[in-house]
Amino acid sequence: MFRKEILKAFKGKKILVIGDFMLDEYIYGKVERISPEAPVPVVEAKDVTYRPGGAANVAANLASLGALPSVLGVIGKDTAGKRLRELLENFGANTEYLFVDPERPTTRKTRIIAGAQQLLRVDWENADYVNGELSKKFNEVILSVYKEFDAVIISDYGKGVVTEKLFEITDKIKRNIPVTLDPKEKNFDLYKNVTTMTPNIKETFNAVKVKPIEDKDAEVAGKKLIEKFKLDYAVVTRSEKGLSVVGKDFVKHIPTRAKQVFDVTGAGDTVISVFTLAIASGATPEEAGEIANLAAGVVVGKLGTATVTVEEIEEARKTLNI
C-alpha cells in the first residue's frame, strides 16, 4: 500500500539526471524473402521512429510523470545528437547541461523490427570515459546547481559519462537531497556516496556474489550492497519476481505487477525514475518500491523504449486494489 497523495506530489518536482544519453532508433518493416547474397532476411523498411534512450529515457519518464527534469551529459556534434536534444526538449527536459563533444559520436542504438519481432540491433558509440576536462566541468556544474533540485539520478550505461570523479562530490549532495544510482557492472569499483542503487539480478550477483532469485537471497544481497557501497538502503530489481527494498532494519519484497510482458527495454529506467520521484515526494522506501514496481509492470506491457504516466500507475493500482 502507498499513500495516494504521493503520486499527486510528483508534479513540478525538479530532478537532475546525470548519465549516458542515447538515441534509440527503430526501423520497422516486413520480411518476405531471404537475401540471395547471404542466408539472412531482407527487411523491406516501412517506417523509422526515434525515442530517447538510456539516461534520456529516465528524463522522458520523469517528464511524463509531471516532473521537471534537467539533463547533464554529453552528445556528439552530429545529427543524432541534434535529434536527441530536440526529443528531450519536446518532452519538457532542460538540456542546458547537455554538452557537445565533437570528438565523440552520440550513442545511438538502431533496432530493426519486423512483425513485432526485433531482428537486429546496431550500436553506434564510443564507450571510453569522457576526458578529464569535461569530467571536471560536469562536477563544477553539478556543485553550482544541485541545490535547485529535489533529487539527483545517476543513470550509468557504461558509455563514459559516469567516472570516479563524479563520486568525489556525491557525498556533499546526498546530505541535502537523495542521490540514486542505476549501476553498470563495469563501474562497480567507482561507486560510493549515494543514497541507494537499483541493480538487477545479474548486476547484484556481480557486485556481491549473491544471486537474488529467492526472497531470502535478495535480503542477503541487499544487506551486502548496503555494506559494500555504504547505502542508506538497496533496491534490488528481480525481473519476474518483482523487486526488493532492503534497509539496515527493514525489508520489503514486492511481487511483479505486470499483466503481460512485450518488451523489457527501459524497464530499469522506469524503476529508477519513479522510485526517485516518489522518495523526493515524501514516500518511504517501501512505498517508493511499490509505486516503482507498479510502473514497471505498466511499461513492460509496451513495445520498445516507453514511458509511464501517473494516470497509468493510478489505474494499475485500482485494478490490483493496492
Image (tube, rainbow, N blue to C red):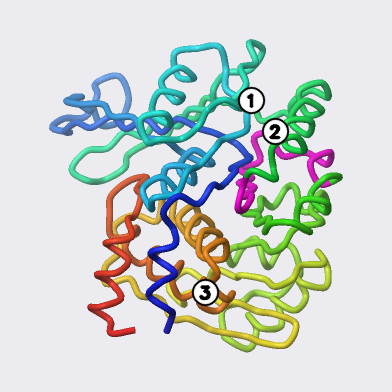
The residue beneath circle 3 is 243
Three-letter code, disc 1: Asn
The residue beneath circle 1 is 126
Rounded to the nearest angstrom, the CA distance separating label 1 from label 3 is 32 Å
Answer with mark 2 or mark 3, whichever residue precedes in sequence: 2
Rounded to the nearest angstrom, the CA distance separating label 1 from label 2 is 8 Å
Answer with mark 1 or mark 2, whichever residue precedes in sequence: 1
Question: What residue lies at 27% left-to-right and 62% top-to-bottom?
Answer: 312
Instruction: Indicate yes or no whether the magenta region holds residue 162.
Output: yes
Q: Are marks 1 and 2 in contact (CB under 8 Å)?
A: yes
Rounded to the nearest angstrom, the CA distance separating label 2 from label 3 is 28 Å
Three-letter code, disc 3: Leu
Q: Split into 4 quadrants, where in the image is the C terminus?
A: bottom left
- Which of the 4 image quadrants contains residue 129? top right
Q: Split into 4 quadrants, where in the image is the N terminus?
A: bottom left
The residue beneath circle 2 is 160
